[in-house]
Amino acid sequence: MKIKLGLLYGGKSAEHKVSMQTALSVIGALDQDKYDIHPIYITETGEWIRGKQLTGPVEDIAQLQLNRTGTEISPMSLSTAIFSGTGAQPQESIDVVFPLLHGPNGEDGTVQGMLELLNIPYVGNGVLASAAGMDKVIMKNLYSQAGLPQVNYAWFIRSEWEQNQEQAYVEVEEKLGYPCFVKPANLGSSVGISKCKDREELIAAFEEAFTFDRKIIVEEGVVAREIEIGVLGNDNPSCSVVGEIAPKKEFYDYKAKYEDEDTALIIPAQIDETTYNEMKELAIKAFKAIDGAGLVRADFFLTPDGKLLINEVNTMPGFTPYSMFPLLWKHAGVSYPELIEKLVYLAIERHEEKQKIRYTI
């Protein structure tokens, strides 16, 4: 029997468009002999739509669905009817959900918690790992406790910064110095990130980052290569080859990731076997430190003296065929359709494992 796969995409997030690109890619790669595809679109205002009637910037996906679905489905409020055959608009129940969501309200554990309550298998990390991986401050605190090497950092809450801005700037200058990077704590895809070389740029960066989040993180700038590795699995994860980002700009920002065509992704990266083995060990340690499941992309700095520093893990990395995570696995011998299939079965495996848990005494 075919697996009824729900693709959850869009969302109330600054990374809405990134999610759209991901959804188009996954829909195009899925084997229709193995899967019944059930797209579920979350608009930027929070409406949930299941079926072929999609609006706004998703006309391409709507056209794809036009050839695969039946009656039009109007926007719905969030309810169990979205995923099951109940409600006023009867539909087939879904076997597995693939949350193709990036950023808050999707990658941060909120949707994962909902799917846990509904007892529906879903691809990727659970509530804890998703929440910890989304919040850069929490993630770095966990990695510090786990003994993982990383750059120095400081973090700030908007309300505290508003009360004493000068103190915040002085703390950054004394603890981290310049250059440094200012980031919203709970966004990905390099949204809202600024590189600062002086006080003037630091002030502007704080103001920019606080428009995206109530909490921001500031990281020490280092001279290093940016290298990444994919982790795939549940309790016994494995690693891909290593890739390197070589942006033509000063750093790998949103435009460099999704709009420019001159950023080089070097796969496999030119590193020695000792560094590769150390990177695999650190990546798996980072994966387990947040109780990861399914997948992460682990991002590192490699300094000129050969020291590895973990930057972050992304619990739902960019997932088009041309994104780093799928390309890393392609070079490791796993094609894009095969990668999707592995993730679906990892989701089922993890869900079956959870069913062994005893909830009564």
Image: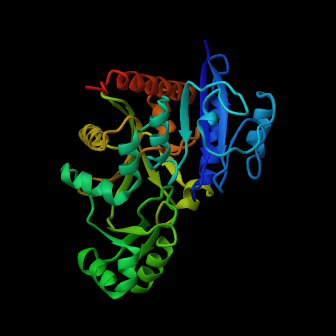
Colour convention: rainbow
**Residue nearer the viewer, 103 or 151:** 103
**Residue nearer the viewer, 47 or 343:** 47
Indicate left or right for 275 with 260 as reference.
left
Q: Does the image show residue 21?
A: yes
Residue 249, percent from left and from top: 51, 65
Quarter of image, res 322: top right
Residue 341, percent from left and from top: 52, 24
Q: Residue at x 66, y 27 (%)?
A: 37
Residue 299, percent from left and from top: 37, 49
Considering every residue shown, the one lying at the far top of the view is 1
Q: Does the image show residue 270?
A: no
State the quadrant of the C terminus. top left
Q: Residue at x 80, y 28 (%)?
A: 70
Indicate left or right for 344 with 40 as reference.
left
Considering every residue shown, the one lying at the far front of the view is 361
Q: Is residue 98 above or below residue 93?
A: below
Quarter of image, res 49: top right
Q: Is residue 149 above or below residue 48?
A: below
Q: Residue at x 50, y 44 (%)?
A: 111
Indicate left or right for 304 with 251 as reference.
left
* Total labels drawn: 0
**Residue nearer the viewer, 116 or 192:** 116
Q: Is residue 70 above or below residue 157?
A: above
State the quadrant of the N terminus. top right
Residue 285, percent from left and from top: 25, 41
